[in-house]
């Protein structure tokens, strides 16, 4: 009879115990769109590659999450919405990574891959528990150090190297690879387009 | 992506519970003491019934015993060499040798007490030759006493009397006349067990009974199933009580065989005798007859020599045998009856376990584990 009671207790407590064990984990993997030209191919007004601003192949990648009510990936609509009513960055979710692009960097694609490899080498997730919100993920590449960024220094336009955006996603539902790219109207993106991307959360209303 | 295995874990838990609960049910039957039961089967379905009984899952320790042989040879009259020796001595006028050959006067009552065929004739001849030898030897009083005893026992005058003298015939006739002239006397017989008593190997009655007999000494032989026969002398008027010893297995087997030879296999007395014959505290006797593909079984259970239950079944041998044995043993209180389902501990354990598992599965199915989103490069 003791054994029977133990069995009953086990049966009764098992569901409760298992309650605490179960957890679903969704993974969203950020991925720079791998093509040539790409978000790292932008040039300044003089036609100089922005990547030339970086010395010793060092840079920082600032990842922001911009709150947006949008559900569709449409550039002009995104910009219009971010002007009004706005798509504010969630400051507590900002992450900054110091990266070193290693290896042969003969093309912008090589740079993109080197930066991505440097980001992934740490193995640390960007967010362990993302909010259940619709956001646009932005990765801004700058010559400013992470230390400066984390002290609150605003990003300078003359220090931008590249910028990429995701489509609006609901982090409460989305799962899988999330492409980061910089929509551009020309073959190579320009500093204006990089700036719009980098300051999307601070665009003035028209 | 990794998913928590909620429902699968609950299913596994249910499986584990089922595995864990199985020994509980198995233990229910194993804990009880297994009663020893002896099985005797007769009839043309004997093999089928024995086979089924051996495969039975009843909680008993089964012993199969063969039925005692039923072809009992009738008892032949016992030869009496003393009679021929006494007659030879009488013819040779050696009356002392005649009396010596006949032995003590008790030989007459001993012969009556033996019972069986020819006992009364033998006793009559022994008594007659004693009268004849005493008379021929010139011992008139002894001859008269022997003749009166012969008359009191109501023994017939044997054919040997043709060899006797007219004086002897007269002596016997006078003795029978004197005895018959006396008013009869009552002799009451009782016993510690039901049975029959035979008086002077001439008449019998079921005890307790009372007989009116010629006054004097008589031979009473008591016989009962399951008891050792006993012969004693009794005076009329008077009373006598028998307290026979229980029959040993061999005698019980012969008594059962005698009944079986008369077609009495299933009576209470017959089953009780069989239980004693095969030394069974719990005896199941089954009379099995084949009926096409099925069997027809009639059975009785004797516990401590008393028939405790009877039952009958018809059907396939395995099912009918199992059912018959179960019914006999339960009704005879050798086996405890199966408690109703709701009174079995296993039932409630099963119900509660099933409820717990159902609750667990329900929770497992309905429960949505917390979800988090991890963002990574």
Image (tube, coloured by chain):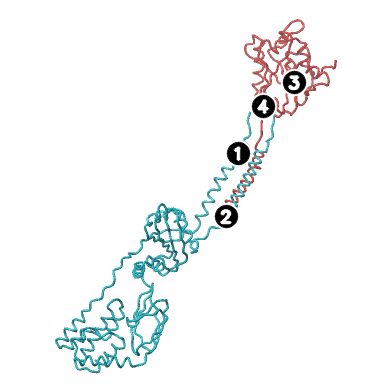
Chain colours: A red, B cyan
> Which label belongs to residue B9?
1
| CA separation in Å, label 4 and label 1 | 23 Å
The residue pinned by badge 3 equals A72
Q: Which residue is at the front of the view, B200 or B358? A: B200
Q: Closer to us: mark 4 or mark 1?
A: 1
Count the marks: 4
For this orientation, the residue located farthest to the top is A46
Dot 4 surroundings within 10 Å: few (below 14), some, or many (20 or more)? many
Question: Marks 2 and 4: which is nearer the front?
Answer: 2
Q: Residue at x 41, y 52 (%)?
A: B293
Q: Are marks 2 and 1 on the same chain?
A: yes
- Looking at the rendered image, the quarter that the C terminus of chain B falls into is top right
At a point 50% along the width and 55% down the height, the residue shown is B29
Name the chain letter of the residue that bears numbered label 2. B
Gap between marks 3 and 1, in whole Å?
39 Å
> Which image quarter: residue B260?
bottom left
Q: Say whether residue B212 is left or right of residue B76.
A: right
- Give the image quarter of residue B43: bottom left
In this view, B354 is above or below B255: above
Whether the residues at callouts 2 and 4 have beta carbons within 8 Å, the answer is no
Q: Are marks 4 and 3 on the same chain?
A: yes
Q: Which residue is mark 4?
A: A27
Q: Chain of mark 3?
A: A
């Amino acid at each position: 009879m003791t054994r029977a009671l133990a069995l009953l207790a086990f049966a009764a407590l098992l569901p409760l115990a298992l309650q605490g064990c179960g957890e679903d984990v969704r993974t969203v993997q950020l991925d720079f769109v791998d093509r040539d030209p790409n978000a790292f191919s932008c040039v300044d007004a003089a036609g100089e590659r922005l990547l030339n601003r970086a010395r010793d192949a060092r840079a920082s990648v600032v990842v922001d999450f911009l709150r947006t009510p949008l559900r569709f990936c449409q550039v002009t609509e995104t910009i219009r919405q971010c002007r009004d009513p706005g798509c504010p960055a969630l400051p507590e979710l900002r992450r900054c990574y110091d990266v070193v692009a290693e290896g042969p960097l003969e093309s912008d694609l090589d740079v993109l891959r080197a930066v991505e490899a440097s980001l992934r080498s740490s193995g640390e997730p960007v967010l362990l528990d993302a909010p259940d919100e619709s956001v646009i993920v932005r990765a801004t590449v700058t010559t400013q150090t992470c230390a400066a960024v984390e002290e609150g220094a605003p990003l300078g336009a003359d220090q931008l190297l590249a910028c990429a955006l995701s489509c609006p996603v609901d982090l409460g539902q989305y799962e899988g690879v999330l492409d980061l790219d910089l929509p551009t109207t020309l073959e190579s993106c320009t500093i204006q387009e990089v700036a719009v991307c980098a300051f999307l959360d601070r665009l003035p209303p028209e | 992506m990794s998913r928590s295995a909620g429902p699968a874990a609950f299913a596994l838990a249910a499986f584990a519970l089922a595995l864990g609960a199985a020994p509980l049910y198995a233990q229910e039957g194993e804990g009880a003491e297994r009663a020893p039961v002896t099985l005797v089967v007769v009839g043309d379905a004997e093999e089928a019934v024995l086979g089924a009984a051996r495969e039975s899952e009843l909680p008993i320790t089964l012993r199969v015993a063969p039925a005692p042989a039923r072809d009992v040879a009738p008892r032949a009259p016992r030869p009496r060499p003393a009679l021929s020796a006494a007659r030879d001595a009488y013819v040779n006028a050696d009356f002392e040798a005649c009396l010596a050959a006949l032995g003590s006067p008790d030989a007459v009552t001993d012969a009556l007490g033996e019972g069986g065929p020819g006992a009364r004739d033998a006793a009559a001849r022994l008594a007659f030759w004693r009268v004849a030898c005493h008379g021929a030897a010139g011992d008139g009083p002894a001859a008269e006493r022997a003749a009166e005893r012969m008359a009191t026992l109501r023994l017939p005058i044997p054919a040997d009397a043709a060899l006797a003298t007219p004086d002897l015939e007269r002596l016997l006739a006078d003795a029978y006349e004197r005895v018959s002239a006396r008013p009869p006397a009552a002799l009451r017989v009782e016993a510690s067990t039901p049975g029959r008593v035979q008086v002077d190997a001439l008449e019998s009655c079921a005890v307790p009974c009372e007989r009116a007999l010629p006054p004097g000494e008589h031979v009473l032989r008591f016989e009962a199933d399951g008891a050792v026969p006993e012969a004693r002398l009794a005076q009329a008027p008077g009373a006598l009580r028998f307290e026979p010893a229980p029959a040993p297995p061999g005698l019980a087997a012969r008594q059962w065989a005698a009944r079986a030879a008369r077609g009495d296999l299933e009576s209470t007395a017959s089953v009780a005798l069989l239980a004693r014959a095969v030394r069974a505290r719990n005896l199941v006797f089954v009379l099995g007859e084949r009926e096409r593909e099925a069997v027809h079984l009639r059975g009785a259970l004797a516990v401590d020599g008393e028939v405790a239950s009877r039952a009958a079944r018809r059907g396939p041998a395995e099912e009918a045998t199992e059912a018959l044995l179960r019914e006999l043993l339960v009704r005879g209180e050798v086996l405890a009856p199966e408690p109703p389902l709701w009174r079995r501990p296993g039932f409630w354990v099963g119900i509660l376990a099933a409820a717990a598992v159902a609750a667990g599965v329900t929770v497992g199915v309905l429960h949505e584990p917390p979800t988090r989103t991890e963002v990574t490069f």
